[in-house]
Amino acid sequence: MENKYTHGVLFYHEHSGLKNINEGIGEVTKSLSSICKHLSIQLSENEGDIIKYCQKIKDKQYADDIDILFILGGDGTVNELVNGVMTHQLNLPIGILPGGTFNDFTKTLNLNPNHKQASEQLVSSQVGSYDVIKVNDQYALNFVGLGLIVQNAENVQDGSKDIFGKLSYVGSTVKTLMNPSKFTYDLTIDGKNYTGETSMILTANGPFIGGSRIPLTDLSPQDGELNTFIFNDQSFSILNDIFKKRDSMNWNEITQGINHIAGKEITLSTDPVMKIDVDGEICLNTPIKIEVLPKAIQLLTFVN
């Protein structure tokens, strides 16, 4: 097969969710090298390294012929590359290879959850343009959340995620739902103000969060809008309700306990100050400003 790209860089992290990261690198390079004349493999040793490498790529200090980037890792590692590309305005396509627990956005890109099979799909994938979330001075592909979603992540004991994977979240979710923390919010979406008390607010760009699909059938990361969900009742009825598919036209009519609001510009403050989860990384606190950057990033997408 003819090489599509001149020089690709594959980023990876030693603490990927893969049991043997070096073996995983070997399994994906066969496919990636078939679409790149030159493939560089770059280890990220510390948090922030990928962003620094993106600056070197921008300044042509890394190489002067790079025309595609790859990332093997979980949602947090992908988020770091997205921030590097957006911060340094790299107009380069990205190929994402799943290497974490949930790998939510690879599902959006129709990629197999297995890294080797996903790499084979990238060979015939097409470049698509996707919206990006800007939250304060950071960027994200998938979601911004606070309340239960942060509480749940913090209830997962250190190390259990690596050992038990998704199973560690089951007990945590039950524990969180049994003892949710409520807070008051002041939310403005496209100029319209909303206030009240809640246990969780979630703003989504992608349709998958925590391994599950948000049942809003017309939610798209390519429509120039973000979808905010306000959870007004943390009872177990939400668990039944959340699995019923519906579109944005009838969501608020048939959904009890979760309000949906679409919009492009969002400001949010809370009492008390709340921690913010950005694509699986708890890295900010309220107040926050969120906006959508329409079709701001290029991602390899598998078309069935």
Image (cartoon, rainbow, N blue to C red):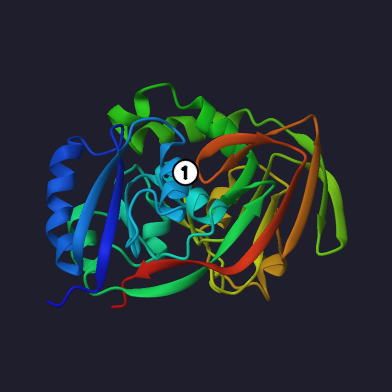
Q: Say few, some or many: other residues with alpha carbon within 10 Å of mark 1 (under 14 / 14 to 19 / 20 or more).
A: many
- Tally the numbered discs: 1
Front residue (pair 131, 237): 131
Give the residue at x 43% y 22%: 157
Residue 96 lies left or right of residue 229; in this view the side is: left
Residue found at x 21% / y 56%: 39
Indicate left or right for 149 with 81 as reference: right
- Which kind of residue does numbered mark 1 sit on? Ile
What is the quadrant of the N terminus in the image?
bottom left
Where's residue 64, x and y in %? 35, 59
- Give the percent coordinates (x, y) of residue 74: 37, 44
Residue appearing at x 44%, y 49% in the figure = 54
Quadrant assignment for the C terminus: bottom left
Camera-side residue: 178 or 19?
19
Give the quadrant of residue 184: top right
Residue at 69% over, 30% down? 181
List the residue tagged with mark 1: 51
Q: Visible in this render: residue 285?
A: yes
For the question of whether residue 112 can be seen, the reply is no
| Secondary structure category for the residue under label 1 | helix
Q: Is residue 22 left or right of residue 254?
A: left
Residue 9: x, y in percent?
A: 29, 54
Direction from residue 97 to residue 254 in the image, left or right? right
Q: Position of residue 14 (x, y in %)?
A: 28, 33
